Amino acid sequence: MKSNSSPTKQSENQEETAEEEMEKEFSAWQSKIGIDASTIEASLSPTERYGLRFREVINPFYSMFYYSEQQRMGEATSMEEEWNVEEIEQEKAEEERRAMEDGDLLVTHPKPEMLPRQRQLYIRERARLRAEKLRRKLTGGNWSTKIDGTSNQPFWYNSDTGESIWDKPKVLVEAEADEFAHQKQWNAVPLKPLVHIMGFLLSYPDRMACAPVCRNWCAGANHFSFVRHVLPIEMNPLAMDDSKLDHNHYRSISDALDASLPGDTIELGDGHYWLNDPYLFVNIPLRIIGDENDPSHVVVELSGTIVWKGQGG
């Protein structure tokens, strides 16, 4: 064992001695040359200068600390480039201006005794702005025409909502119809209020008497909203809840007959209808119609008899 370990110890001692000698030689060389970089480089041999240049320029060595520091500095530089402080300040000022115009922001520095009055002024101003916005919505004052930059065609633009459409807004069409009605009187009453008025009349004989007055009155008297619709058996599961039934919609023919008035129209949709009562009485004049395109799509199965006592229909 001694013969095996002694050469190892001798080699280690020789390496330590060589390192000490190299350190002494480097210290002596450094004290002679100095620490100036140009002086050190001038004292090197051409091969040594090439090796130093190779490590500094051609294939330099960088530590992990250097890489992390460079990455941190790059991120800081990119953040400074991305954040445009002037643009952010302009956007903030524009947002505050819009908030003040809409009445959502009021900038004041009142005295404590002035706060109740300032609060009332704020509430009144906000109510005024909201009322003006509602007025523009009802009268169409928020709509104006603009010219499209691509097609050079006019379009309609809503200054309150930012909406843009090609066709004339519905509120302006209705306003023109109302103005026309004031000029032409009853013959030019718009369809919507005309249908509402005729909803208070009986189908027969009142609405039928109104139909021959003019074309507009005829369209109002025969408006589809006055038709009573009966759902087929296939759609009954969708209408089990009364709140889901639309106006003038019924689950069965019997329910529609009970609610009908003289002159009404009952429409049967595509599907099956079952009448299990022994007798179905029709005591008033009315119409029962099916699909206007193909009546064969409407199937009524009777287990009893229909007794028609109405004078007409």
Image: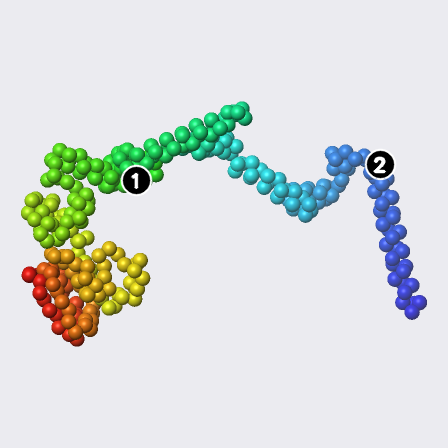
| Dot in front, 2 or 1 | 1
Q: Pinpoint residue 204: horizontal percent, then vertical percent.
A: 10, 53
Query: Can residue 269 be seen by looking at this rendering?
Result: no
Indicate the amino acid at tag 1: Ser
Indicate the amino acid at tag 2: Ser
Kindly state the secondary structure of the residue where label 1 is placed: strand
Image quarter of the N terminus: bottom right
Quadrant of the image occupied by residue 255: bottom left
For the point 74% across and 37% down, the residue is: 41
Q: Pinpoint residue 141: horizontal percent, then vertical percent.
A: 28, 33
Q: Pinpoint residue 187: horizontal percent, then vertical percent.
A: 10, 40
Q: Which residue is mark 2?
A: 31
Q: Is residue 62 left or right of residue 258?
A: right
Q: CA distance from mark 2 to mark 1?
A: 84 Å
Towards the viewer: 135 or 155 = 135
Quadrant of the image occupied by residue 53: top right
The type of colouring in the image is rainbow
Towards the viewer: 309 or 146 = 309
For the point 86% across and 54% down, the residue is: 15
Q: Which residue is mark 1?
A: 164
